[in-house]
Amino acid sequence: MDRRRASQLLAGYRQFLLGRPTLSSHEQSISGSYSKLNTWRPCCMFRVSVGTPQASNYLNLGKTYATKQRSFGSAATDIPRNPAFSKLNADDISYFRTILGERNVVEDEDRLSAANVDWMRKYQGSSKLLLLPKSSQEVSKILHHCNSRKLAVVPQGGNTGLVGGSVPVHDEVIINLALMDKIISLDKINGILVCEAGCILENLSSFLENEGFIMPLDLGAKGSCQIGGNISTNAGGLRFVRYGSLHGTILGLEVVLANGTILDMLGTLRKDNTGYDLKHLFIGSEGSLGIVTKVSVLTPPKLMSTNLAFLACKEFTSCQKLLLEAKRALGEVLSAFEFMDSHSMDLVLSHLDGVRSPLSSSLYNFYILIETTGSDETYDKTKLEAFLLRSMEEGLILDGVVAQDINQSSSFWRIREGIAEASVKVGAVYKYDLSLPIDQFYGIVEEMRNRLGEAATVVGYGHLGDGNLHLNIMTTRYDSDILAQIEPYVYEWTSKHKGSISAEHGLGLMKANKIHYSKSPETVQLMVDIKKLWWLSINFKANEVLTKKSQKVVVKEAAAVTRAYY
């Protein structure tokens, strides 16, 4: 969700996957002067490059680590293929061509190679078939056939995930929803959008902004991720502190079950208390219960006043206090509260071309981005400036600047959202997406630095406003000895401090057998029971099954509940 540059790379991947030409690279210059908090004078101009490479450039980035090497991304073991499931044959392919047409049944090795690998180049399947349905009915026919033939399938959308849930484990049939990208309707009075699940998040955002609304969800990967995948992973994003979880903004869903049944829950009512609200089972279920094909979402009005401040703090306790004071003083206009440590800042400045710090001094210990969004520009700006000056007087802020236009705002976000891109340029990256109490938020970062010493670079950043830490541990290459020092220690530490091992990335293959660190055996058993109930015949996410053993959840055949789209 912090991967705007990665989103541009994946846009090329999407065009390549669909067999379309890609755009050539380009640069956009961003310059201007800021409102400086301590001097209130303009500071220096700078440039930011935001190119979009050819798909072939993306596809050749880095090294691909095969299935048997997945232990480098997590402490998972090799996963044998379940012999109960059939293998694809010529009759299956002929049937799919009768319902999808020749063009949307893909056997081309290059396009399959792209679809079989996640964007981190860590997880790789061996699927021989990619299907591109254009409607819910086509998805239904695909699943009905696969169900009758015992063919394993894996849904896929933008393929921007970080935990190995959007690619096959073995030879599953890939069902990609990229062609299901129609906007069905928009209620301009209530702001209720109905669309297909393959719609790109950024396209929805652009459409809504032209109509006077915004998506309640904003991600760095919005140029490639699909709304169906966002829902299936319950993606959080940059606006979570303002608009909350998708559980609160999704009004209805259409879902195709494993046996091909189309489940119509596509309501547009704010209130409907007739029985179980089943859509919530599919939000965050990572595609394990069915394929989301349509969505109804409540979209907020577009507000005309947006302000963004880039701030520096000396101590993490200052960041904590600043968050509390921001909630009190900014209240109704606070829309984002993002965090980076000095190692994150240094990483971006060292590895991303054209990126410069908006602050004139050398590196500080911690950085905060505060965004406000409201309806009265003068009132909102005055309110923010008063809060910032008071915070500086109290010593919570050492330095800071306020963006004066949209280009400067983009440059601020470029720093925060460029951390993931910069990290992969170092070499091997071990990524952890943790949810922690605010008072324990940075503790694991310091623990891992002490634990690993000079063997790795450890950075911490994320959504401090909602307690979501992104812990990135970087080394020159993947190493089993390094991994043994990281896992299971990270998960044990998180569990000890009452956190979650997955805040917004999902479990996927990477953390499927780690769910017991965040959920009780009784809770997981209920998940197992629900999954069995929905699987009328188990062909769906066929190599991924939840089991319980010795009061812990272990992997049987593959992953637990895995990320399907995002």
Image (spheres, rainbow, N blue to C red):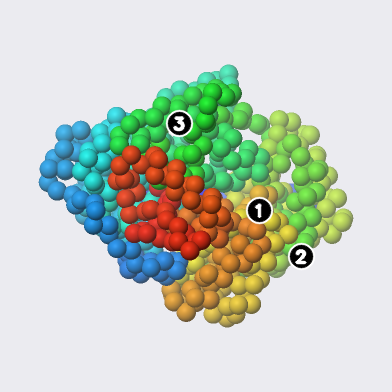
Which residue is tagged 1? 467
* Front residue of 491 and 309: 491
Residue 181 in the image: x percent, y percent? 38, 33
| The quarter of the displayed image where residue 355 is located | bottom right
SS under mark 3: strand
**Residue 62 lies in quadrant:** bottom left
Q: Amino acid at mark 3?
A: Leu
Helix, strand or loop status at disc 2: loop
Between 550 and 448, the one lying in front of the other is: 550
Comes first in the chain, label 3 or label 2:
3
Labels 2 and 1: the sequence-earlier one? 2
Q: Residue at x 62, y 40 (%)?
A: 244
Q: Position of residue 369 (x, y in %)?
A: 68, 52
Q: Dot 3, how many residues are within 10 Å of its Cα: few (below 14), some (14-19), or many (20+)?
A: many
Residue that appears at 48% across and 47% down: 527
**137 up-or-down from 331: above or below:** above
Pointer 2 with pointer 1, Cβ within 8 A: no
Q: Which mark is residue 253?
A: 3
Q: Amino acid at mark 1?
A: Gly
